[in-house]
Amino acid sequence: MTDETPISLWDLTTEETALSPEMDGDITTDLAIIGGGFTGLSTALHAAERGIDCHVLEAKKIGFGGSGRNVGLVNAGLWLPPQDVRAQLGEERGTSLITTLGDAPAYVMSLIERHQIRCEATRTGTIHAAHSPAGYEDLARRTEEWHRLGAPVDLLSREETTAKIGSTAFHGGLLDRRAGTINPMGYVRGLARAAMAAGAGISIGVTAQKLTRIGDRWVIETDRGQVSARFVVLGTNAYTDTLWPGLKQTFTMIHYFQAATEPLGAQGESILSERQGVWDTGRIMFSMRRDAFGRLIVGSMGRVIGGDKGLSRRWARQRIRAIFPELVDIEFEKFWHGQIAMTPDHLPRIFRLADGLYTPIGYNGRGITPGTMFGKAMADLVAGGHEGDMPLPVTNPSRVGSTGIRSTMYDAAFTAKQIKDAYRR
């Protein structure tokens, strides 16, 4: 049996039912997918719709990893400005990725509509808020390039940003009208429901323990039996373990924590009245959004420290008061954190680990749209597509040095920032 303790606010409030199918005996399939998050379930849905026999193995429960702990911003593009993506990948490959992820919010919303996924979806955009004058200059540079590409984005003045967010704390913002917000646990459960309806198999509470190539098939040894498959996709991203040697060393793992208030009621009506999601230009990013019930959810890099009565609670209270001084007597309903896979250049990867074995990985905190689109691309590849048609170059894995030390250093820096903000007057 899996642990039913809610892992996030989204786990508590989603209207989508938790699916709990268990593995019953050995399985033979065309495509085995390890990980029941955005990537794994998008792969399963699109593969099943193509008539490919596939099966998802999830160690905990659907959405247990980063998918169910996500902020829920359905963003277009990556953290990097489009021109920086092209500089790193080249004109052709860079433009392909920019186009794929620029169109991704619309595709995510189309899946939500087509499969009637109950996930509190909004399509009013997201705001990248300038935390400083230098941050505003960066947003202006991004806006100029997005305009060149014909994207519906607006550079907001300080006054316009204040009107949208309901706070004078920011120096301006970039409103991306392609984007939106969702309850991410609702979305990932909806993908699972849709995948099963299309014919995909799903088993939860199954830990993959060993991968072995035998002839032209992969054999996955689990704690519930064996799975034999022609192809395997690892959809574990930041929750990757030691199943494939060295894969965990291809990214640096960091934490991201969030705090959700109780519904604000009338005193929150002027805050994000159009329900855009917000993240800022600070090096240690801050995020903020409202849910469908009027809760304010704020977050930043790092872990929850001290549970719901400790440092993180003080941090959340201080940050909210600094941005919205009119809010008084704030009470919190839920604190949680999740893991992010960060790559040195802030670009995701699609690795070919061996014949018939692939993993998209390193989403750098952008799980919803890349996970959905790369899952679709994985299904296309298994259906007979070519690696050259993938959104990113398919490469062999390359390790990042001292990932454990880097994670520890980042964790210390994020904790120090949390302390500083919590006790700022």
Image (cartoon, grey):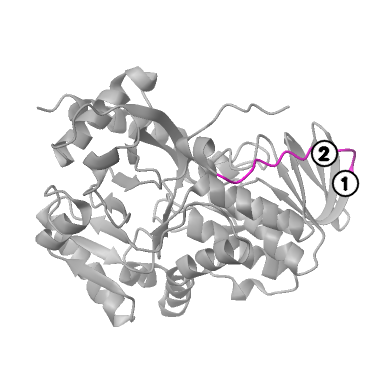
The residue indicated by pointer 2 is: 23
Give the amino acid at mark 2.
Met
Magenta highlight on residue 104: no
Nearer to us: label 2 or label 1? 2
Main SS, magenta residues: loop
Q: Say which quarter of the image contains residue 61.
A: top right
Identify the residue at image location x=17%, y=34%.
321
Residue in front for this viewpoint, 369 or 93: 369
- Mark 2 to mark 1 CA distance (whole Å): 8 Å
Do the residues under discs 2 and 1 have CB atoms within 8 angstroms?
yes
Q: Say which quarter of the image contains residue 287.
A: top left
Give neighbour class at mark 2: few <14, some 14-19, many 20+ (Cα, 10 Å): some
Relative to residue 228, is residue 176 drawn left or right?
left
Rendered position, 262 above or below 359? above
Residue 133, percent across and down? 10, 56
Identify the residue at image location x=41%, y=34%.
407
Magenta highlight on residue 24: yes
Quadrant location, the C terminus: top left
Residue 32 in view of the camera: yes
Give neighbour class at mark 1: few <14, some 14-19, many 20+ (Cα, 10 Å): some
Give the amino acid at mark 1.
Ile
Magenta span of residues: 15-27
- Name the outermost residue toward the front: 266
Relative to residue 128, is residue 381 drawn left or right?
right
Residue in front for this viewpoint, 156 or 29: 156
The residue indicated by pointer 1 is: 27
Residue in front for this viewpoint, 26 or 309: 309
Residue 141, percent across and down? 21, 69
Identify the residue at image location x=46%, y=57%.
121
